[in-house]
Amino acid sequence: MMIDAVLFYVFAAIAVASAVVVIGQRNPMYSAFALVVTLCSVAVIFGLLGSPFIAVLQVIVYAGAIMVLFLFVLMLLNVKREKDSPSRGQRTLSGVALALVTVLVLQAGAVLLRSRPTPAPDYDASTFEMAKILFSPHFLYAFEATSILILAALVGAVVLAKKEL
Amino acid sequence: MTPLAEELLVTFVKIVIVVGALLGGFSVMTWVERRSLAFMQYRLGPNRTGPFGILQPIADGIKLFFKEEVMPVAANKWTFLAAPVVAVATALLATAVIPYGPPFEAFGRTLQIQIADIEVGLLFIFAVTALGVYGVVLAGWAANNKYSLLGGLRSSAQMFSYELALGFSWVTLILAARSFRINDIVDTQAGGFWHWNVVVHFPAFIVYFLAATAEVARIPFDLPEGESEIVAGFHTEYASMRFALIQMAEYINMITVTVLLANLFFGGWHSGVPGMPESLGGFPLGFVWWGLKVAFFLFVFIWLRGTLPRFRYDQLMQFGWKVLIPVAAVWVMTFAVLWVVVGGGPR
Amino acid sequence: MASVTNTNTAPPVSPEVLAKPAARALREALGDRVLSIEDFRGDLTITVERRAWVEAARQLRDHADCDFKLFLDLCGVDYLDREDRPERFEVVLHLYSVSRKHHVRLKTPVPESDPRVDTITGVFRGANWFEREAWDLYGIVFKGHPNLIRLLTHESFVGHALRKDYPTAKRHVLKSSKEVLVDIPPGSENLLVNIGPSHPSMHGTFRVQALMDGETVRDAEAEIGYMHRNFEKMAEERTYWQIIPYTDRLNYCSSFMNGHGWALAVEKLLGVPAPPRAEAVRVILSEFSRIMDHIICVSTNVVDLGAITPYFVMFRAREDIYTLLEACSGARLTVSYVRIGGLAQDVPDNFEALCRAALASVQEVVEAGDKLLTRNIIFMKRFKDIGVMDRDEALSWGWAGPCLRGSGVDYDVRKDHPYSGYEQYDFDVPVGTVGDCFDRYLVRMEEMRQSVRIVEQALAQLPGGPVITDDKRVAIPPKSEVYSNIEALMNHFKLIYEGILPPPGETYGYTEGANGELGFYIVSDGQKHPWRVKVRPPCYNIYQAFPHMIRGGMLADAIAIIGGLNVIAGELDR
């Protein structure tokens, strides 16, 4: 599909570019906004893969909820632009080096594990199929356990915060 | 014409119709709101431009278009410019998956005024409205004004809190219809009005109505722009067309939640009277029922504004978290149990 | 201390004055530090030595025979080149005892060479702004005052504007504005927000600065004086009746009542009462003005809460009242209808019909407003237990009127010291219990209904006769006589040329204004201009407490409170 391919590359480029902005920006607000763009672009790629459910969840949970909280805190604390530090150039250099090494390692791993990339199997990622898999005996326990874990974390956070109040 | 090109053409025409109707609806709504509020308050409202003042929105548009664009010196330029665009874009995006009226036969095929009938329609709306808050937050932050910032803060907290309740209120409808598609949910309500979700899922309706009012920041939940406290909140520094864009986004959001209200809870285009003919002289009557419902609930929003004072910030938060969300959650549980035990749901 | 009064024995005081418990108590407590005790036109005046100033104020507040708990007013007076006064300056304090229903005036002379006196902010919280004002306008220093800076004039103003030797034609160019009013703790990340001088819910030009922690007000400070035009200085250069139009500009929402209060204060000084018909008409128009003021207060207050409809619904009644005022006086907003000794002219023939129409409209809108608001759950949530001012605090701040009664103090000048024939009318004084915004709202709503009752009674028994006194020293004779006989012409000429010449002395005339006790302290030296006029503006005391009330609350509460206090800038800044 020609259109799919074009859309994929466009949104992949946007995702990568805005991800670079996230780490390159010194103004935390800009970083947060760029992260929202990244998350939305990734959501579009999910959609292109035939899973609108995951795409929409990506936007709801990450872009719609978590990032709003981030922004809320940034605005509430009125976080200022990060100041230039003298060792900036050195840090940039080491950061880039670290990123390159990571990419190389990952690529090497991919090549070693599977010498030739095979096309992904045709996969039905519709909501109905997703639900069937998630709620199958195979995943049900893990799925529910995860929600309990998140709930526990939530209660823990509230208790910790209450102590300070 | 290839099927793909035909499909694209139809979609394009639909986009033109929907966006055009929404923009028209936005202008008419400003006039309707001003006039009806005026009549509630022993005033006349705008009555000078055209018959009954109906041309007032056009005059307003011309005025706003020619006004000077003002930007505070300390504002963050690009974010300040982007905010109204983001607001309108997200507002319009949400309208893409909503059906406006019943399917009908024309040009030898079955058509429906709905740009994209996607599988996860309701979730899509949920996601896009979740993004809608960015327009407000950007506007509040970029203007570098303390009142704007307070408005942005209020807005992000409020929308975030009430989105949860909003989403919760849809869960039982989705369960009952076994689908995220809005058309499917409308079709479960065919027949008599006792099949309407407002009857079957009454608690969900209450939660949805209140949460939706809060989502579109109408009185009594209009804290992000509570003019007596924080001047005009997040859009304090906006003027001319940028201000008009922000207003447009707000009204389009209001129309969206109202259309959803009619579709999800009041049977959409179903008349609610058994035996009512589907069409009259080839015209699908569903449009009439649907239009009446939408118009009524749009008026309800205006009516609320003419009646109620505004909540306080902490009261709003408490109401959202301590009342609406628990009610919605309990209703989801109750409905699920009842559905399985009594209503013959899946075992 | 001046030698004239420096005696070791207590000064001679007439026995009837000493019969008053407060006078006796203070003399016993302070002995020879009391310089004199006088009674002029029913005003008890006690002069004490400067070093006994704070002690005297404390005794008046706490002594069982005094119990002067309600702080009314504090001001300076400049007696430049007056042979009959021991020192150039005098500081004057007015207090009221709610339990004994009695006013008292406490004075102390302050020399020009050392214009200092101890602060009484430790005794009455309300003295704070009054002492700042006295420092600002007279240059009297109050030792120990927490924040003795200029209040009404600009911070870079030079000189003290109310001193007699201050050249009135002097001009200043004042540009800067004070950016930070509150104390910001070091390292604080809180947001500093200015509410006003121009802000949608500041009803007039005044400013509150709030240090915000999110939506919570951590600290707040108020600044006033944007509308200051020094009414009191202008009054010193006008004749007694020329001052009437200036009083209209004090509380412009109920301008008639200011004139009414002024006329009564001058009539008290002169000892000349107005005829019964004039008094009855004054009562009717005053009560209508009170209703208007309360309508403005209640309806704009709820607009600040976001409810716009009650505002438009209730405001309609003001239209009918303005029509009535216009028919009587020819003006709608600033009526200037009162004259010393009566009214400018008799009411028009359709007076009663206009009153009845206005009454009907008032009753309708009060009930409509009541239906829209009183049991509205959101409204109650926004008003109940918000801005609570307890009884003792309210007295110490010097609150008055509906706000004081909302805090549970049963004090209404109309009931406790009837004037203009209020004793003939049957009405109730509503009193609150909690002292929150909701109580203040309920008191105002009920007062409107009571005002309707008063007007109905006054209309039913409206007496005939003249509307202005026939005392030739006070009232201009009618034009028909001026044109026809020489005595009247000469009388007219003398009055216009020389003005009203009251006896030397000082009186404090007080009426129940829409916001509370509106007092005029007049010092006369027998000339045609008053030597000193001091207005006790009721909302000055009330607004003074406002920054203290909002600390720790939400921003939205501050907005709900300010509307219910009904602060009118014209009266606040004078």
Image: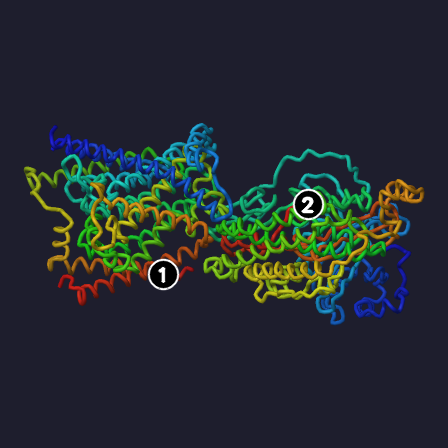
B24 or B194: nearer the viewer: B194
Looking at the rendered structure, the secondary structure element under dot 1 is helix
Q: Position of residue C307 (x, y in %)?
A: 49, 51
| The furthest residue to the right | C486
**Quarter of the image that includes the N terminus of chain C:** bottom right
C420 or A47: nearer the viewer: C420
Viewer-side label of 2, 1: 2
Q: Position of residue B161 (x, y in %)?
A: 35, 53
Q: Amino acid at mark 1?
A: Val
Looking at the rendered structure, the secondary structure element under dot 2 is helix
B182 or C19: nearer the viewer: B182
- Residue C150 in view in this figure: no
Side of C287 where A23 appears, left or right: left
- Labels 2 and 1 positioned on one and the same chain: no
The answer for how far apart the CA atoms under marks 2 and 1 are is: 53 Å
Q: Position of residue C86 (x, y in %)?
A: 87, 53
- Residue B255 in view in this figure: yes
Side of C110 where B43 appears, left or right: left
Seen at 76% across and 46% down, the residue is C244
Q: Position of residue A103 (x, y in %)?
A: 18, 37
Image quadrant of residue C462? bottom right
Side of B66 where B16 appears, left or right: left
- Label 1: few (<14), some or many (≥20) within 10 Å? few
Q: Which residue is mark 1?
A: B323
Q: Amino acid at mark 2?
A: Glu
Q: Which residue is mark 2?
A: C326
The chain that hosts pointer 2 is C
Residue C446, which numbered label? none
- Label 2: few (<14), some or many (≥20) within 10 Å? some
